[in-house]
Image (spheres, helix red, strand yellow):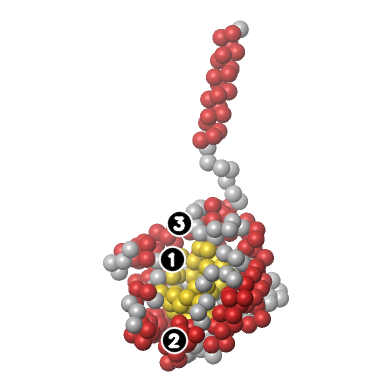
């Protein structure tokens, strides 16, 4: 009897050990796909970096999660990713408190002055605003950062390299002056680089990317800083490998990781 009890106890311990070594229960198929897609994107980034004799460590992948549920963002977070981007202030302010505090949030949408304070107070872990496109929004960010007593806010200047009226962004010829204003007059902001979106069909993105790189050259010459200190945020789901090959340090990937977006019937602009 003692031997049988000992055998049963051993079998119970063995079974428990086996369960502890199993991976967590599988998530729904769409969530599992997001983690797998992230791994695929990171692999493609490494390949593009190697092709251009760069290290993939020089390239930040911003997982753009607009319109996606918190559970899906959490799955990508649990896969090891920490940098996420959102386009709408209200959506980011609602999501951020439901997710871990070590996420580095990038705001990558058009920012209105009346949304600056809700954004900065509602998202303490906001790491960067990539879409500063005029002195007014730069000044407002600068004032709010000071008034709430947060650390320096990293910003990028958005450049409209495609010349489309529908896109936000400063004209390339005005880029240097805006960067100078931020660097000299906005002491609570830290200028980090330039950002562009490019054409919707990607037919002219090589030219768009070249334009942004040329803007960086002019900015760095004017400010007297090395080009390595001025990031290039360019490249999205359809063109990020080309962007990496052309020098991007920050790519914004949404649907390739999370799947096609589902917009509500009425979507607020911010």
56 displayed left or right of 67? left
Q: Position of residue 190 (x, y in %)?
A: 47, 75
Q: Residue sitting at 55 percent across and 27 percent down?
A: 15
Q: Quadrant of residue 49?
A: bottom left
For label 1, the SS is: strand
Secondary structure category for the residue under label 2 = helix
Residue sitting at x 50%, y 57%: 81
Dot placed on the residue nearer the N-terminal end, 2 or 1? 1
Front residue of 17/201: it is: 17
Label 1, label 3: how many angstroms apart (C-alpha)?
A: 14 Å
Q: Residue at x 49, y 73 (%)?
A: 154
Viewer-nearest residue: 183 or 245? 183
Front label number (2 vs 1): 2
Q: Quadrant of the N terminus?
A: top right
Quickly name the residue at label 3. 39
- Name the residue beneath numbered marker 2: 180
Q: How many marks?
A: 3
Q: Earlier in the sequence, mark 1 or mark 3?
A: 3
Find the distance from the CA under tag 2 to the CA under tag 3: 38 Å
- Is residue 33 something one can see in this rendering? no
Q: Indicate the quadrant where residue 8 lies.
A: top right
Label located before the other in sequence (2 or 3): 3
Compared across the picture, whether 162 is left or right of 114 comes to: left
Report crowding for label 3: few under 14, some 14 to 19, many 20 or more residues within 10 A (C-alpha).
Answer: some
Q: Are marks 1 and 3 in contact (CB under 8 Å)?
A: no
């Amino acid at each position: 009897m003692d031997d049988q009890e000992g055998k049963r106890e051993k079998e119970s311990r063995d079974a428990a050990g086996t369960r502890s070594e199993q991976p967590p229960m599988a998530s729904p198929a769409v969530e599992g796909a997001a983690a797998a897609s992230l791994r695929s994107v990171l692999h493609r980034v490494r390949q593009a970096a190697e092709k251009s004799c760069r290290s993939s460590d020089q390239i930040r992948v911003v997982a753009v999660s607009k319109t996606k549920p918190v559970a899906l963002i959490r799955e990508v977070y649990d896969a090891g990713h920490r940098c996420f981007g959102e386009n709408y202030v209200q959506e980011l302010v609602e999501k951020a408190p439901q997710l871990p505090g070590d996420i580095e949030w990038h705001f990558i949408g058009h920012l209105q002055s009346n949304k600056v304070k809700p954004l900065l107070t509602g998202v303490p872990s906001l790491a960067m605003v990539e879409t500063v496109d005029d002195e007014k929004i730069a000044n407002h960010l600068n004032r709010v950062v000071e008034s709430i007593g947060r650390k320096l806010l990293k910003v990028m200047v958005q450049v409209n390299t495609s010349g489309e009226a529908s896109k936000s962004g400063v004209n390339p010829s005005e880029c240097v002056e805006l960067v100078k204003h931020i660097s000299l007059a906005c002491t609570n902001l830290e200028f980090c680089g330039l950002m562009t979106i490019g054409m919707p069909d990607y037919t002219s993105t090589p030219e768009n990317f070249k334009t942004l790189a040329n803007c960086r050259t002019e900015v760095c010459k004017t400010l007297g800083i090395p080009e390595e200190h001025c990031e290039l945020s360019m490249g999205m789901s359809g063109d990020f490998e080309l962007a990496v090959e052309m020098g991007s340090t920050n790519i914004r990937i949404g649907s390739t990781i999370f799947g096609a977006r589902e917009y509500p019937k009425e979507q607020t602009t911010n």
